[in-house]
Image (cartoon, helix red, strand yellow):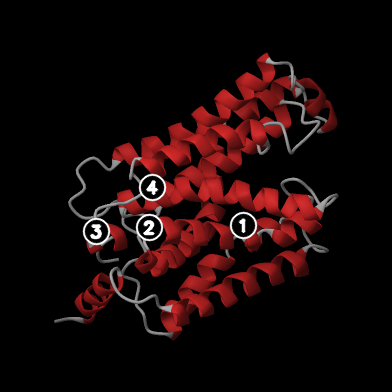
Amino acid sequence: MNRQNIIQEQLASQSVGAVDWGGIIWYLLGAFGISWTLIIGLRPVTSQAETIGMFGPALACLLVRLLRREGFAGTGLRPASPGEKSAWRWYATAYAVPVTILGVSIGTSFFLGIQHWILPETARQLEVSTLQLTGILLLLPVVIVGLVMLPTFGEELGWRGYLLPRLLPLGETKATLISGFIWGLWHIPTILLNNHGFGAANPWLSIPMFVLVIMLYGIFLSWLRLRSGSIWPSVLAHAVINTSVSFLFASFSVGNRYLETPIGLMTLIPFAAFDLWLLLTGRLHGKRDSRRITGGKL
């Protein structure tokens, strides 16, 4: 029996055994330590510090797996789990669900007069023509989403490629909620330093609200990971969410971030409804097949 098969058997037993808290602790120290150091340390040097910091979870995943000789089985780097005949549906879902939810939320907000179209004003602020900005926005669905998948891969390799599988002995629901909560806390420096999400004006409210946002996204991303056996649908969905949020911020007024789209209650309510549907219908629970959960061999 080769080393790869041995690792697979260990992961199969792990799915119904004890949580590897040692690996989790080392991973979290690495993910938080590397990312926070990059975000805080590079902030005076570059405006891309937050994007660079998104690769911290991936680096932590790689370091822990190498230093602890865990191997890379279970990372979910295959496009789909072995034997999956309709993998395309997970990628279609990864794209369609966030676009639909965000579209419904902004459409409702626009219809009710809560938000209004500000693309021309945004173009003037950016010192480009409305036509140029429109052209850029037309590239969002494919070109820009593809580029954004690079940093979202940096996050997903860690959160859904390492942490989530390691927490699965607790059950899919607990693993998803715990990993989502930790993922939310990881964003604290970007909230306090870079005015990310709800901004730093009211940290006592901004931090828990943004953690809630991230947990709701995390349920959806974890569902894609568990059911597809691959991290790539989660990478795509994460990129679609980030890109769509940027588009909505640029195109529609946001007077009250806690209420309005793309991250306020107008979006949280439909996203929470979709996540609740996943939980109540048992769709979060993938087949208890170690090859599906771990993605088989590398």
Which residue position holds label 1? 184
Residue lying at 38% horizontally and 42% vertically, measured from the top left: 280
- Does 142 sit left or right of 202 as displayed? left
Q: Quadrant of residue 74?
A: bottom left
Upstream in sequence: badge 2 or badge 3 = 2
Q: Is residue 269 above or below residue 204?
A: above
Question: Which residue type does callout 4 highlight?
Answer: Leu
Q: Position of residue 47 (x, y in %)?
A: 76, 55
Nearer to us of marks 1 and 4 is: 1
Q: Is residue 52 above or below residue 101?
A: below
Q: Position of residue 256 (x, y in %)?
A: 79, 34
- Does 274 sit left or right of 184 as displayed? left
Quarter of the picture containing the C terminus is: bottom left
CA gap between label 2 and label 4 equals 12 Å
CA gap between label 3 and label 1 equals 27 Å
Which residue position holds label 4? 224
Which residue position holds label 3? 288
Q: Is residue 38 above or below residue 29?
A: above
Q: Are marks 2 and 1 in contact (CB under 8 Å)?
A: no
